Image: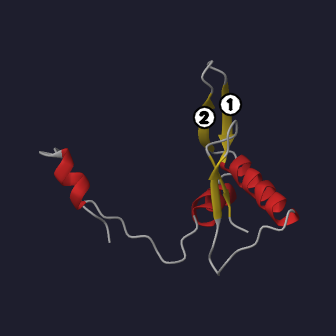
Amino acid sequence: MKQEIPHQMTSYDEFVESFRIEVPEYYNFGFDVIDKWAETDRNKLAMIWVSQDGREKKYTFRDLRNLSVEAANILIKYGVKKRRPGDAHASPCSGMVGFCNCPY
């Protein structure tokens, strides 16, 4: 179900208060978004990372998928396990790209 977004909000607070997004029970951003784009167009630009001193690095969806797989493999190597079906691990990674989404 798509929510209609008003073209001119009269109240940002009201909009935020009433905003709802439906997420399927077993939604996995890594599989459902990153991997799908990586399969569709492996060189499509996904993100531009810019450091505080202005250094820039570009990542494709394929790059992000590969980084996610590498991070998941490290967690598996060190014995990190899911607690229940559907669990995933996402954590901030200092000095790395945004968040590591490791759906293993």
- For the image, the number of numbered tags is 2
Q: Residue 24: which disc?
A: none
Residue drawn at 70 percent across, 40 percent down: 96
Is residue 17 found left or right of 63 in the rendered image? Answer: left
What SS does tag 2 mark?
A: strand
Q: Name the residue furthest right.
A: 77
Q: Position of residue 9 (x, y in %)?
A: 16, 46
Instruction: From this view, report whether residue 74 is shown above or below residue 13.
Output: below
N-term-proximal mark, 2 vs 1: 2
Quadrant that contains the N terminus: bottom left
Q: Nearer the viewer, residue 4 or 12?
A: 12
Q: Nearer the viewer, residue 40 or 54?
A: 54
Q: Which residue is mark 1?
A: 57
How many residues crowd mark 2 within 10 Å: few (<14), some (14–19), many (20+)? few
Residue 35 image position (x, y, % from top left): 66, 61
Which quarter of the figure has residue 18?
Answer: bottom left
Rendered view: 55 above or below 17:
above
Q: Are discs 2 and 1 less than 8 Å apart at CB?
A: yes
- Mark 1 is on which residue type? Lys
Look at 11% across and 45% down and name the residue there: 10
Q: Is residue 46 above or below residue 89?
A: above
Within-10-Å neighbours for mark 1: few <14, some 14–19, many 20+: few
Q: Does 29 sit left or right of 57 as displayed?
A: left
Find residue 48 and name its label.
2
The answer to whether residue 50 of the structure is visible from this angle is yes
| Rendered view: 95 above or below 88 | above
Extreme-top residue of the structure: 53
Could you tell me which residue is drawn at 21 percent across and 53 percent down? 15
